Image (cartoon, rainbow, N blue to C red):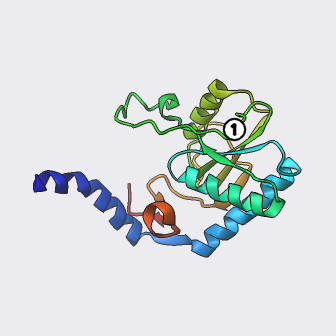
Amino acid sequence: MNHQTTFKSRPERRRRESAMSARIVLQQADIARALTRISHEILESNRGAEHLVILGIPTRGVILASRIAAIITEISGTEISSGSLDITMYRDDLRRQPTRVPQPTTLPAGGIDGTTVVLVDDVLYSGRTIRAALDALTDLGRPRAVRLAALVDRGHRELPIRPDFVGKNLPSSQSERIYVRLEELDGEESVSIDGSAA
């Protein structure tokens, strides 16, 4: 049983070791500033906080969405709730990775009809995750508009999707890995890039 436990934990240990050896590009204060700037930009684009819904894409996007909603609430004085949008069953790689476990979708009271939905993700890469999110939204209602916020845009888009609000543009090669670590989930706060990870 000990051998089985060690075997199961090995991929997670390798991921943690890679993240530790990676070059840090954003620290905790940088992430906080980026989210504050994104929140101000969302308010400006929406001309206030009215009819605004913030939905995070699991896993770290949900945490970021919650933080953005809290910042907007503080800035505007209008209570903004965040939610989560599970995209598992809408992914185009589901057949290749059938072990993905769906996460709960939680919407603010009142749903999304007629609202401006801001989707939040930690890293924007090929755009396929966002395509899946748009498909998931279609099954939930009809928002007035959909916007996209990403903490990191690393490029390499495969679909015509671009973010409306970006914390940091981080040009990278496809062989590099971007690690977003958040206090609530990882016990530390940083964005790093590892060129040794294929």
Which quadrant of the figure has residue 64?
bottom right
**Height in image: 2 above or below 157?**
below
In this rendered view, identify the residue nearer to me: 192 or 195: 192
Task: Tell me if residue 28 comes above or below residue 182 in the rendering.
Answer: below
Residue that appears at 50% across and 49% down = 59
Which residue is depicted at the point 81% across and 42% down? 51
Secondary-structure class at tag 1: loop
Q: Is residue 6 left or right of residue 131?
A: left
Hey, which quadrant is residue 100 in on the image?
A: top left
Q: Which residue is mark 1?
A: 109
Q: Position of residue 12 (x, y in %)?
A: 31, 57
Residue at x 68%, y 50% (from the top left corner)? 149
Residue visible at 60% across and 34% down in the picture: 131
Residue 151 shows up from this direction: no
Q: Position of residue 155 (x, y in %)?
A: 60, 51
- Which of the 4 image quadrants contains residue 35? bottom right
* Residue type at numbered disc 1: Ala
Alpha-carbon neighbours of circle 1 within 10 Å: few (<14), some, or many (≥20)?
few
